[in-house]
Image (cartoon, rainbow, N blue to C red):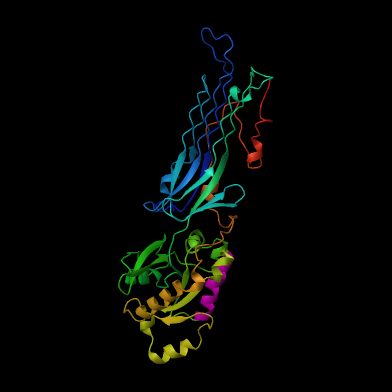
Amino acid sequence: MADTNFIDYVKILCRSGKGGAGSRHFHRAKYVPKGGPDGGDGGRGGHIILRGNRNIWTLLHLRYQRHIFATDGQSGGAGRSFGKDGEDRIIEVPVGTAVFDAETGEFLADVTEDGQEIKLLRGGKGGLGNWHFATSTNRAPRYAQPGQPAIEKAVVLELKLLGDVGLVGFPNAGKSTLLSSVSAAKPKVADYPFTTMEPSLGIVSYRGDKSFVMADIPGIIEGASEGKGLGLRFLRHIERNAVLLFMVPADSPDIRHDYEVLLRELHEFNPDLSTKSRVLAITKSDMLDDELREEMARELPDDVPALFISSVTGQGLTELKDLLWREINSEENAAAFDMIHRPLDRRHRVEEEDNFIFEAEPLDDDDQLLTDEDWNDEFWDEETSVNPD
């Protein structure tokens, strides 16, 4: 997919800023021989923040910005002056972006709304200045807290398009033709397999001012869940769809078998997909007469509502919209977007991204990184963090 601007998978290296050190300064002024400690607190390090942006459609901008580092907090100064906080780094991502740990594949966060902000990595807290530790028995403390270390993590960002209806079918099943017939989208349509090389979205008008979003993905072949064909690369885009529209052409030798193969591939990719509402559309039905259509209807699966449609003549498209609208607004789909993201494994990764070599700027010799095990509220105990030496 190097020749397209549609980037839906990217691996980046993030690092929050470390906290500034507290100051060990003592007040010095004329006629004030023992001014006492007045070292200020260090500033906190910058955060790494994800923000949803509905005006961004792909992760292309992050493909050329692999290292995102927040700045460090500055040290405290004299006169109890606070150090400046580090600058936060805000990563703008499309709505529908899921975040995974690049090392373990664990799901970390999900951006589903425009303007939603998620603090991916917290900046280190600034250390306290020596004036905090002055007591009646220790009036001249010559120590202060260091700043908290930074956090560094490699993450994988996966874009999963937000759509109400997802089109599922083998190559040349008529998915792109249907999308172009019921919406203003202009996907590529041709008479050879794998015409669609990247997902497409279309807004379908329905009875006046109502509408819903339909998502088209490249054709699925048997074995797609194991990495065959193009389906595995784009199956993630239908994970958010409320309704799955299975499309099988009327000239298929066994419609029931094709439907079961498609359903099995979705289940192998993510078992949650098989629990979504499903509708079966028999495409290219304009080549069938009434007698043959009735005979084929008796062989269709019983567990899914089915319709015969033709995107060229418009046959059955109105009934299809009615059926999809009822399924979208049914009570079963009320929590359609509360999906459980499957963790990344070798089948779901993009090889060229995972093999990307990070050549990040090294930390200074005195810098340390904070691991996930160390990152908790108890780590920064004011009593145990003081270094009296």
- Residue 254 visible in rendering: no
Expressed as whole percent of the image width and height from the top left, the position of residue 239 reads 50, 63
Q: Quadrant of the C terminus?
A: top right
Residue 251 vertical position relative to residue 119 in the rendered view, above or below: below
Task: Give the magenta part as a residue range.
Answer: 255-268
Expressed as whole percent of the image width and height from the top left, the position of residue 252 reads 46, 79
Give whichever of 227, 144 is nearer the camera. Answer: 144
In the image: residue 172, left or right of residue 314: right
In the image: residue 301, left or right of residue 143: left
- Residue 49 visible in rendering: yes
Residue lying furthest bottom: 291
Expressed as whole percent of the image width and height from the top left, the position of residue 351 reads 54, 51
Residue 386 vertical position relative to residue 59 in the rendered view, above or below: above
Please tell me whether the stretch drawn in magenta is mainly helix, strand or loop. Answer: helix
Residue depicted at x 59% and y 56%: 343
Residue depicted at x 48% and y 39%: 68
